[in-house]
Amino acid sequence: MKKVYLLTILMTALFSCQKTEKMKEKLFPEKPYQDAKIDKFYWAINHSDIDQIPLIKPVFLSQYKGKDEWSIKVSDFNKSEIISNLLNPVLSFNVNNIYIYGFQDDDYFGETNEILFSKKWFIINTQEKQLVYFDKESDFREELKKLNLAEEFLNPNEVYEQYKQNPILPWFPENIKKQLEEVKAKKKNK
């Protein structure tokens, strides 16, 4: 009888430990990037109802969950013309050195489908905090050539899916990429 009683206590303790461990994992999930003291800008991909793709700190592409429109907040930049505090919707983009550039499609207003802002090409110089709009694609491409910027563009949805799988994007600073790689390697070796 004592053996049965002892066995019951032992089994209860064992199951309690497993439950405690599972609860601990839920309450205190691993935070490898935070623990490695990597700047949150580069790895915090979503904030409650917003998904983000980090571009050049502090600029990122953002999208409300459930929507299919990516935008860039540009209220901190000097603009060639005053249009809006957001580039929205951004259909394609690229990042090179200090530049973020791409294409913003027509932005429609509410249910009336009235065009609020017409499509534009844009170049953001993050160092000088300058945003320049182009009405003509030919003018935009000419400026890209002057700045020696690639004329290849990325789809935000595809980049986001890639980023969720591997949070190391080609335009990140080398020291950040190195830190992210180290954490990724540690996670893989566990």
Image: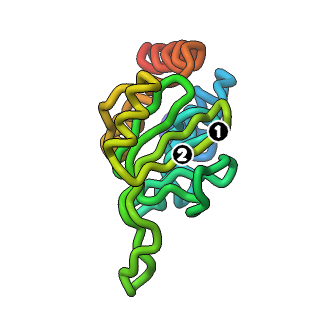
From the top left corner, tell me how far across and down residue 119 is, in percent.
38, 60
Residue 70 figure quarter = bottom left
162 shown above or below 116: above
> Which numbered tag is attached to residue 186?
none
From the top left corner, tell me how far across and down residue 153 is, in percent.
32, 36
CA gap, disc 2 and disc 1: 18 Å
In the rendered structure, the answer to whether residue 48 lies left or right of residue 110 reads: right
Which amino acid, by three-letter code, is at mark 2?
Answer: Val
* Residue at left offset 67%, top offset 33%: 128
In the rendered structure, the answer to whether residue 183 lies left or right of residue 120 reads: right
Q: Which residue is mark 1?
A: 58
Nearest to the observer: residue 139 or residue 113: 139
Around disc 1, counting alpha carbons within 10 Å, would you say few (fewer than 14), some (14 to 19), or many (20 or more)? few
Q: Nearer the viewer, mark 2 or mark 1?
A: 2
Residue 131 figure quarter = top right
Nearest to the observer: residue 182 or residue 22: 182
Residue 103 visible here: yes
* Residue at left offset 38%, top offset 48%: 103
In the rendered structure, the answer to whether residue 12 lies left or right of residue 138 reads: right
136 shown above or below 82: above
Q: How is the image coloured?
A: rainbow
Residue 40 figure quarter = top right
- Label whose residue precedes the other's in the sequence (2 or 1): 1
From the top left corner, tell me how far across and down residue 77 is, in percent.
66, 47
167 shown above or below 135: above
Residue 7 visible here: no
* Residue at left offset 49%, top offset 50%: 133
From the top left corner, tell me how far across and down residue 48 is, in percent.
56, 57
Which amino acid, by three-letter code, is at mark 1?
Answer: Pro
Q: Which residue is mark 2?
A: 132
Query: How many numbered badges does the structure rendering display?
Result: 2
